[in-house]
Amino acid sequence: MNTEEIAKRLVELCREAKWETAQKELYATDAVSIEPEATPAFEKETRGLPAIMEKGRKFSAMVETMHSLKVSEPIVAGGETAYDIPWVVLIDGGTASAAEIVAGAIRDYDRGTLVGEPTFGKGLVQRVHDFEDGSSARISFARWLTPDQSPIPDEGLAPDIVVARSPDPEVDLQFARTPFMVAFQAGWFQFNLCAVHIYYGAASGAKTISGAAGGSGSS
C-alpha cells in the first residue's frame, strides 16, 4: 500500500470505530505511541503494537459516552522541496499562535536565526463559551509548548538579533538587513512568518520566490 491508500483505509476504519482493526492492519509491530507528556493513566511512550492496543482498550474503558464520531478526509502531502540551507526568520509583535510555535521549533532545532522584535506572546489555547443572556467567556485551558517543552512566554519569543521596525511603513528594516546577514553563506533562505521570501543559490545568481505563508493570531 502507498501512503494515500494507507490514509484512506485508516479513515475508513476510524469512521466505523474499528480502532483495533486499523492498528492490526496498518501499524508496524514496533510502532511507538507518544503522548505530549506522561499522565497518571498513560506513560509518555508506549512501545510495540500489543502494548499500543492495550493502551487503546484502557482509553476506551475510560469513555463513558460517545455523542458523535467524525473523521475528516485525509490530507496526503507530496511533491514538496526540502532545503538544507541556512534560514533567517523574521518575527515581530504580529507573530502569534501557530507562527510563534513555528519560530520556537526553528530555534529549538537550531535550524535558523530569529531576527526582528519579540513576538506577540500567545502561548495559550483558549475556547469561547457563549451564554443564553448574550454574554460570553473566554477560557484558557492549555498552553502550547515548543519541541524542547518550553512554553511560549507572555512577553513573546525574543529574537536572536534585534532589528526594530521603522516608523516609516514604506521601509522594512528587517527585510532590508536580512539578505546581507546570510549573503556570505553558500545558500540563502529567508522565511517571514507572514509572507515567504525564498532566496537560494549563490549571491551572484540568487532568485526570489514570494508567496503567502505562516500564521497569526490574536488574544
Image: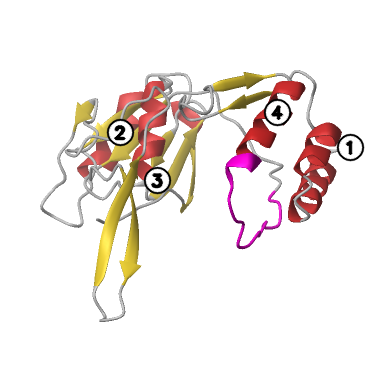
Image depth: mark 4 or mark 1 in front = 4
Q: CA distance from mark 4 to mark 3?
A: 33 Å
Left or right of residue 154: residue 32: right
The majority secondary structure of the magenta stretch comes to loop
Q: Residue 98: which numbered mark, if any? A: 3
Q: Amino acid at mark 3?
A: Ala
Q: What span is colored magenta in the figure?
A: 60-75
Q: CA distance from mark 2 to mark 3?
A: 22 Å
Crowding near the residue tagged with mark 1, few <14, some 14–19, many ≥20 C-alpha atoms within 10 Å: few
* Residue furthest out toward the right: 1
Which residue occupies the foreground of this view, 205 or 107?
A: 107
Residue found 46% across the figure and 50% down from its top: 213
As helix, strand or loop, the secondary structure at mark 1 comes to loop
Q: Amino acid at mark 1?
A: Met
* Residue 212 part of the magenta-drawn span: no
Image depth: mark 2 or mark 4 in front = 4
Residue 190: quadrant of the picture: top left
Is residue 183 visible to the viewer in this orientation of the structure?
A: no
The residue identified by callout 4 is 54
The vertical placement of 135 against 73, above or below, is below
Residue found 53% across the figure and 22% down from its top: 43
Q: CA distance from mark 1 to mark 3?
A: 33 Å
Task: Point out the tag, 2 or 3, that comes first from the N-terminus.
Answer: 3
Q: Residue 1: which numbered mark, if any? A: 1
Residue found 71% across the figure and 57% down from its top: 73
As helix, strand or loop, the secondary structure at mark 2 comes to helix
Callouts 4 and 1 close, C-beta under 8 Å: no
Q: CA distance from mark 4 to mark 1?
A: 26 Å
Q: Residue 178: which numbered mark, if any? A: 2
Left or right of residue 18: residue 34: left
Left or right of residue 25: residue 36: left
Residue 129: quadrant of the picture: bottom left
